Image (cartoon, rainbow, N blue to C red):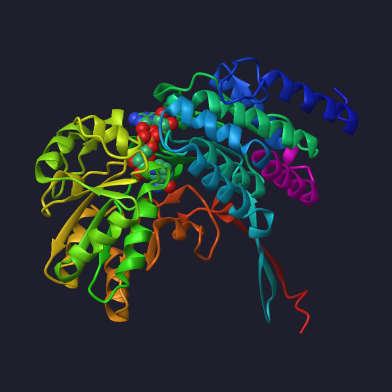
Amino acid sequence: MDYTEQNVRKLVEEVIKSMNLTSTNVNNEKKLGVFSNLNNAVEASDIAFKEFSKISLEIRKKLIANIRKISMEYNEILSKMAHEETGMGRWENKVLKNELGINKTPGVEDIVSEAFTDDHGLTLVERAPYGVIGAITPSTNPVVTIICNAIGMLAAGNAVVFNPHPSAKKVSASLISLLNTAIIEAGGPVNLISCIDEPTIESAKELMCHKKIAIMVVTGGPAVVKAAMNSGKKVIAAGPGNPPVVVDETANITKAAKDIVDGASFDNNVICICEKEVIVVESVAAQLKEEMKKNGAYELTDNQIKQITELVISDPGGPGHEGAANKNFVGKNADFIAKGIGLNVPSSTRLLICEVDKNHPLVWTEQLMPVMPIVRVKDVDAAIDLAVDCEHGFRHTAMMYSLNIAKLSKMAKVMNCSIFIKNGPSYAGLGFGGAGFASFTIASPTGEGVTRARTFTRERRCTLVDYLRII
Ligand code: NAD
């Protein structure tokens, strides 16, 4: 086909029309960039990568701008599709989450070269793409992870083949097709982003072993991180977390309570960085709970806590053991979960709070739902010690509310996390009401932290001996 602007516009319009994108009608017609065979997807993206390598940086920038534009245009539809398909989260929160990824994921401007000069001339260090990246994405943030990965990986000059979570395969394929239309419209090659229509754990493993895949970028729980690490390829791994929140007696309790409810209930707690357990100094514990209740929290009795734990935890975590949540309740609304034990709470309830002792399974298990354990401890040092233990050494995310800079510094150091947030909700650490850029692939196990375009590049050095220094 001749890629004139007129032809491309026509193609884009036809594809969008054929996709018939609505929140209730997700059709499975042939979509751009979507293959039924993994090898074909990789081969197509490999061809696209080679074409992309010849394209100017100006077109690369236009292509990223177009990805942001089309993602924003379809944000609400994609959010509703993701909610319907996965049954998790709150679509209105997904709109905000996607908007954050669309607007604040760094693009081509993040790829910065370095120069060294001395008596021996000039050395230039530039950032080159890896090639075709294999990316595995989660069910919990299906849309925003693909958008952030696509922006960062393409801004760095790569192509990418996605193996989305099977329970988000339809919305992922629709999104990948849409992004291809945006790329073509900007003058980029088709299949620069691809996926398969029936992703499985087997196809994820096939992707990890494919000889044309340069590196793997995985976003998910412990099993996929382990599998990717054993693949023999370079891996950027964004794994699980169990983010603790410490509140001490110097904190602004009114603000802490509101921020904790807002952060922990955002998209029903499915984001890996969301607050998962509160550890509070006993002198302010009662006040914290009262303030949380004013902001949408509902406190369960001891008997209700026992029942809810049996309902939502399938493998109880404990010291040294991560445990697992019951998937039927992951990302559900608080009132739905309460109904599971025959309890009717107002539908406006954002969070169910449970005061428990420090060995309780809710403290040690990544629940990914709006059920929040609260533990009282005697002082701030005991709180920090418990926070370190129940984070399981994931080094993912932690939060602290305090006005004591010595204790804020102590916790930041000993947690040793990719993200540490002081006096704000979890999402502030992703640039939502906090300074800095966004990403929904936070690579704690492999150490890249909050990933960005430059994360997906190889450094290449070029030295000219004795010349080109200009001073
Ligand atoms: P999941 O681990 O069930 O699935 C993630 C992806 O990995 C899916 O595409 C799945 O098909 C694939 N997968 C799972 N097991 C695999 C295996 N053995 N071999 C190959 N592929 C495999 O995760 P989920 O439930 O979709 O997402 C929630 C989990 O992901 C939580 O643990 C959360 O903390 C984590 N997460 C981390 C980040 C981060 O940035 N660090 C972001 C989002 C989610």
Q: Along the horizontal axis of the image, is 46 left or right of 324?
A: right
Q: In which quadrant of this rendering is ligand 1 seen?
A: top left
Residue 191 place in picture, x, y as percent: 67, 29
Inspect the magenta stretch and tell me whether residue 422 lies in it.
no
Question: Is the residue 102 above or below the residue 126 in the image?
Answer: above
Majority SS type along the magenta span: helix
Q: Quadrant of residue 247?
A: bottom left
Q: Would residue 103 be found to the left or right of residue 211 on screen?
A: right
Residue 426, horizontal then vertical, whole percent: 40, 57
Of the pair 461 and 177, the residue shown nearer to us = 177
Residue under the point 48% across and 56% down? 430
Residue 339's image quarter?
A: top left
Quadrant where the image shows the C terminus: bottom right
Along the line of sight, the residue nearer the viewer: 38 or 10:
10
x 55%, y 59%: residue: 437
Q: Quadrant of the N terminus?
A: top right
Q: Residue at x 19, y 71 (%)?
A: 380
Q: Which residues are magenta?
A: 51-71
* 314 sits left or right of 26 in the view: left
The percent coordinates of residue 284 (x first, y second) are: 20, 69
Look at the image and tell me whether residue 205 can be seen: yes
